[in-house]
Image: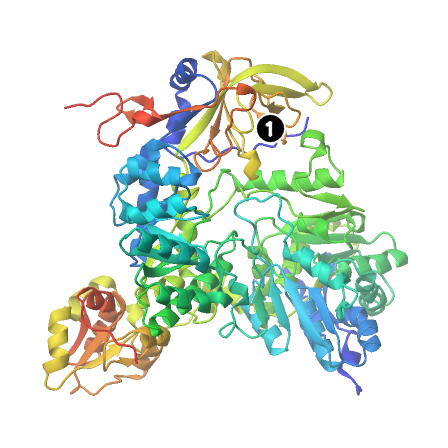
Amino acid sequence: MDVPLYLRPRVDPPLASLLTDRPFLHSLVDALGSPLNVLLPEAVAENAARFRAVYRRHHLTGRAYFAHKANRSSALLRRLAAEDPATVGVDVASTEELRHALGCGFTGDRIMATGPKDAAFLWLAARVGATVNLDSPGELERLSGLVRAHGLGRVAVLVRLSGFEHATGHGGAGTRLLSRRSRFGTPVRDSEALLSALERNADAVEFVGAAYHMDTTGVEEKARALEQCVLFMDECRARGLAPRALDIGGGFGVGYVAEAEEWERWTTALTEAVLGVRPPLTWRGHGYGLRNEGGTVRGAAALYPAYRPTAGPGYLDELLSLPAPVLGRPPATLLLEHLHDLYIEPGRSLVDQCGLSLARVLDVRPADMDAGQYLVRLAMNAGDMSLEEHGVLVDPVLLPRGEAASGDGEPVGVYLTGNLCLEGDLLTRRLVFLPRLPRAGDLLAFANTAGYAMDFHAHHAQRQPVARTVAVERRDDSWRWCPDEDYWPITPLGGAIG
Amino acid sequence: MRYDSITEAIGNTPLVRIDPAVHGLRNIDLYAKLEMLNPFGSVKDRPAWHMARPHLEAAADGDGTVVELSSGNTAKALALLAGMHGARFKSVTNRMRVPEIKELLLLLGAEIEELPGRSECLDPTDTDDPLTHFHRALSDPGSTYLHTDQYFNPRNVEAHAEGTGPEIVKDLDGRVPDWFVACVGTAGSSTGVARVLREHDPRVRVLGLVAHKSDFIPGIRTIDEVHQVGLFDPATYDTIESVTSDEAIDGMITLIRRCGMLSGPTGGAAYQGAVRQLRYADAELDGTGQRRTAVFIVCDRAESYLSYVRQRRPQLLGRTGRGHSASAVTNAEARAEARVIDVDDARRWSAEGDPRPLVVDLRSPHAYAALHIEGSVNIVDEVFEDLLRGGLPFSKRTPVLLACPVGEKSLRYAAVLSRMGHPDVRSLAGGIVAWRDAGAPLVRE
């Protein structure tokens, strides 16, 4: 066997200290079953504070809206609801998410309704005074119709823009920054129709500002979009409207892998495996989107950039500091000078380090004796823990059952398979290296799954148990827990003191 | 030397010996092949002309557009060559990471398309990637695109096999160097030169240099990226080593300051990588009385990489301050020395003051145009900073009210103006934001 290709997870306190408490985590799974999701509500508040610090550094005001779809937990939402209303809100994309947010303590004015919306969703959002992030002039007309028909108050709206690369007039001559086409939002070139619709429906809606959300890790594209929105809002002001907030979406990213070197070694090895100059390091030679054409690698690796030197608040800081392409001033300066509030929607990065998913090892058997590889079957399936589905490659942490078992044994390469009777139910298509061979009864902990990876794809196929979720908190020397639905941010876990 | 066209000046670049006192090798003569002295400034002039020539001569009506995936020197050469032949040039790239090069390309009349960043949320159904669009557009039967395809075009290698390689042999009096060192970008120069040298003498050792994986050196690919290059064949190289941007800049500085060679970072990387590698061989030669020869390529010139250097080694471009500057004022000094005025008092002062203060808005003209305090003048902070270097820009008899977004920058400038002897300058507390929040009027004219 080669040197083991680890991709060990980045774990900061308090998640790191939770992972060292093996008896506690084993007792949770013994009592509540596998799979099990564990959340740290205090960590989400810490993250919100980190984003606030970036705002402060740039003298900006405005809210971070948590993207509810990243995690359906009540504990996280309730903990965020307890934060300063002026700085933390929630972004909901369905009627049920809206009801949940209200039930967790968010008042309507802290809620933003986004995504595809039906009439009930629009009506409830309007009824409770939420801000509606409009996808198109058509949606604006439907909303205005509801407001008039049901005698509701004026609804605060943001307009979601897209297609910034086609914007004309201000772009530097000869340069076109391409972007992936989005199916959401109104193309900037069609903004005239949007503006006249806003003016026409001014009795029903109050125009608060513009929004964009881009599927890219490219800071330059976002800086360009931000600047185009500032220019758009100036145009709105010239027409007598009074926008005051710019929503720049999320996509600030999370660093999953701790060491750059491990990430680099693994991705290089993938290229070499695709070229056939080293043995495959994936199930059936899967190339994650790379292919070998006559000795040259083609295609793009469909992988989340799992090691990231800057992510989350750091990424926001970088974006706000980058000179904008037309006006030359950094986005933070543009926002400040034009007197705009900044709204952000960090989903994944707001719940960075906020949770983990636990699975019990059911069975271990050889996969390839010559190569020393094993299949490790878990009481969990690819729907319960979908890091792989999101292209995130990161190792689980092995939590042996026995006391003495942690140190002994040799590193071993395993494929993690799920509990469904499907060839495709692999938790990793990648050969995962563990410090020793697991045994039935051990636990594997997948760190940092709170953003999209914990229950985003969970389902009842084949009637396997869906994970329960608990909230945990460190008090004195021990961890306390309660079911996610029983968590409230007003009393310490495990009962009130005084 | 008299030519009819600038293209005739491509090639025949000098081979210059590096002073042993600089590199410290006792038994090896190290030569630099100064490709930066090609007419468009780089080693890419050769393949660009060799690849584009058939296209440009075939499309003599000047209707076509030459396209290439390039963010640097190939684009530069192709843009000039296309321009000479009445054609257009379009570069498609993963990002122009060096701003000067982007601006230079725009000056040359190039059109630039930058590809989007990586997807943040994986979408397995994504078929919309711009590279696919690019190739689709090229294969369109009605397309007038002339694709030079530098990463796969054998003429890229040929240009060096017919030019660069034979020139090195000729300048070494028909001998082949013992080592040839080249950075790997398209692999064109290393492959072409290596082929010719091996034909003369198979004992030549070829060192290919790639960029350290997490690092960025313009013009060099990382070890993973070279595998995406059609011209790259690992068998070309006896050794492949990686270099860091730090080493590249070290090498560049040595070549510039000690050898008089105005090399860019790629040449610096080649020099530094060569010396690092040759040091061992040199030690083994001690006492044997043998001499060896090595050649490396200086790909291009330094001027286009100033911002690259500024970002990574700002001290090399350190400027000493002159005159008054707001950045020289600490926060504590600004708080101690500047006068502030709150919104209510400022409103009264600007309406009833005798004389009334000059209100200076330090924001960008664009923000000023959108909304500002009536009667204020706009001097954007960067310009104001320059003005102050020259002296006090206002009469001491004119009171001044400085305003910026939140009252932080204006505080510094108020402190500087006070230091310069202005008797009555005040900073608007809380800035334009506080002014707006207090409900004071802002106008758009």
Q: Nearer the viewer, residue A457 or A283?
A: A457
How far across and down, in percent of the image, does residue A359 sit? 50, 21
Mark 1: give few (<14), some (14-19) or many (20+) Cα within 10 Å.
many
How far across and down, in percent of the image, does residue A236 sit? 37, 69
Q: Is residue B43 visible?
A: no
Q: Is residue B50 left or right of residue A168?
A: right
As drawn, A409 above or below A284: above
State how many labels appear.
1
Badge 1 element: strand
Q: Is residue A348 left or right of residue B321?
A: right
The answer to which quarter of the image holds residue B84 is bottom right
**Residue indicated by mark 1:** A432
Q: Identify the residue shown where x is 71% and y is 68%.
A: B67
The answer to which quarter of the image holds residue B72 is bottom right
Q: Nearer the viewer, residue A90 or B27?
A: A90
How far across and down, in percent of the image, does residue A184 sit? 50, 53
Say which quadrant the N terminus of chain A sits in: top right
Q: Nearer the viewer, residue B20 or B361?
A: B361
As drawn, A457 above or below B375: above
Q: Chain of mark 1?
A: A
Q: Identify the residue shown where x is 26% and y is 76%.
A: B443
How far across and down, in percent of the image, does residue B212 sit? 61, 50
**Please, which colouring scheme is shown?**
rainbow
As drawn, B409 above or below A92: below
Q: Is residue A412 left or right of residue B416?
A: right
The answer to which quarter of the image holds residue B289 is bottom right
Q: Is residue A170 visible?
A: yes
**Amino acid on which the number 1 mark rests in the picture:** Val
